[in-house]
Image (tube, rainbow, N blue to C red):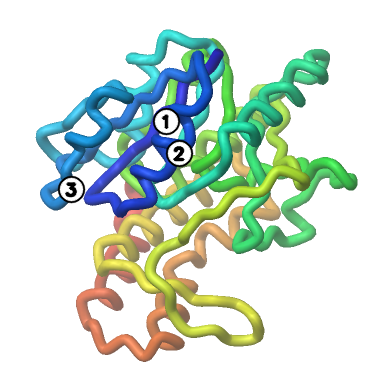
């Protein structure tokens, strides 16, 4: 039927619930690519999944590329360890793609209510879908042949903006990326932080701010990124600092990594 590639790094019990949910449907190939977790026991899922344990944390981009290599199906869903969706919903996404087989699809994803998309980032919207490139990696469906034709994820990005880079490359090659509004997924974006004006500013580890800043600047320099996106990506390090300030962070290391990422992004 299809493959599900889940990338993990010290996951929570949500992963076990998700694997059990997927296992209720025949024909789903479950592949877990683990980035050298040190605090999780995978023994309870060993008989349900293909487990690939990496010796080092290679980042989400490389882990996803490895997962695709092991996939024996042409249709592949990507997931993070903090997502949960019913197997029935995944089948619904696949059926939508089959019904609309005249469309040159890149990725199709479920709706996540915590992901706010600015109007300027939406190409088209209806009661059924949102046509945009700002789509979370987790939950995305893509054909293996399309994935390989695009060269897969850019491994030098490691984490953060990896999916955006890939989605923009898809768009530049003539593919359409959609979010289906009637299919919902639960997903946690980092550790909960403060809420201001109904917007939550999550907390991340210091090194995560480095990758977010660096990769945002990198994307802003790429020719396949539409101009209206570039300023937002280039200023990603300022959003990191804003988040730290609003969360009352006194971590000098986190602020330092925001600026360090910005300068590294100029030369990546």
Neighbour class for label 1 at 10 Å: few (<14), some, many (≥20)?
Answer: many
Residue behind mark 3: 40
Counting from the top left corner in percent of width and height, residue 171 is at 67, 31
Of callouts 3 and 1, the N-terminal one: 3
Whether pointer 3 and pointer 1 mark residues with C-beta atoms closer than 8 Å, the reply is: no
At 32% from the left edge and 24% from the top edge, which residue is drawn?
A: 48
Left or right for 202, reference 122:
left
Whether pointer 2 and pointer 1 mark residues with C-beta atoms closer than 8 Å, the reply is: no
The quadrant holding residue 94 is top right
Residue behind mark 1: 153
Nearer the observer, 201 or 233: 201
Q: Nearer the viewer, mark 2 or mark 3?
A: 3
Residue behind mark 2: 79
Nearer the observer, 206 or 260: 206
Callout 3: SS: loop
- Which residue is the extreme one toward the right? 126
Q: CA distance from mark 3 to mark 1?
A: 26 Å
Q: CA distance from mark 2 to mark 3?
A: 18 Å
Neighbour class for label 3 at 10 Å: few (<14), some, many (≥20)?
Answer: few
């Amino acid at each position: 039927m299809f493959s599900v590639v889940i990338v993990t790094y010290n996951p929570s019990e949500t992963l076990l619930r998700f694997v059990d949910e997927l296992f209720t449907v025949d024909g789903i190939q479950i592949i877990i690519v683990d980035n050298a977790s040190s605090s999780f026991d995978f023994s309870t899922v060993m008989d349900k999944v293909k487990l690939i344990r990496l010796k080092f944390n290679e980042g989400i981009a490389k882990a996803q590329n490895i997962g695709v290599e092991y996939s024996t199906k042409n249709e592949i869903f990507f997931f993070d360890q903090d997502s949960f969706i019913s197997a029935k919903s995944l089948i619904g996404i696949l059926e939508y793609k089959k019904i609309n087989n005249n469309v040159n699809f890149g990725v199709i994803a479920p709706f996540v209510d915590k992901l706010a998309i600015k109007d300027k980032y939406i190409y088209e919207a209806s009661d059924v879908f949102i046509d945009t490139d700002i789509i979370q990696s987790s939950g995305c469906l893509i054909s293996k042949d399309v994935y390989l034709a695009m060269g897969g994820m850019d491994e030098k990005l490691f984490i953060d903006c990896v999916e955006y880079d890939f989605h923009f490359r898809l768009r530049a090659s003539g593919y359409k990326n959609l979010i289906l509004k009637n299919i919902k997924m639960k997903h946690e974006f980092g550790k909960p932080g403060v809420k201001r004006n109904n917007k939550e500013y999550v907390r991340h580890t210091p090194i995560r701010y480095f990758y977010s800043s660096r990769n945002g600047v990198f994307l802003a320099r790429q020719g396949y990124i539409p101009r209206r996106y570039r300023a937002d990506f280039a200023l990603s390090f300022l959003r990191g600092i804003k988040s730290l300030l609003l969360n009352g962070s006194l971590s000098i290391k986190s602020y330092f990594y925001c600026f360090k990422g910005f300068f590294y992004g100029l030369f990546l």
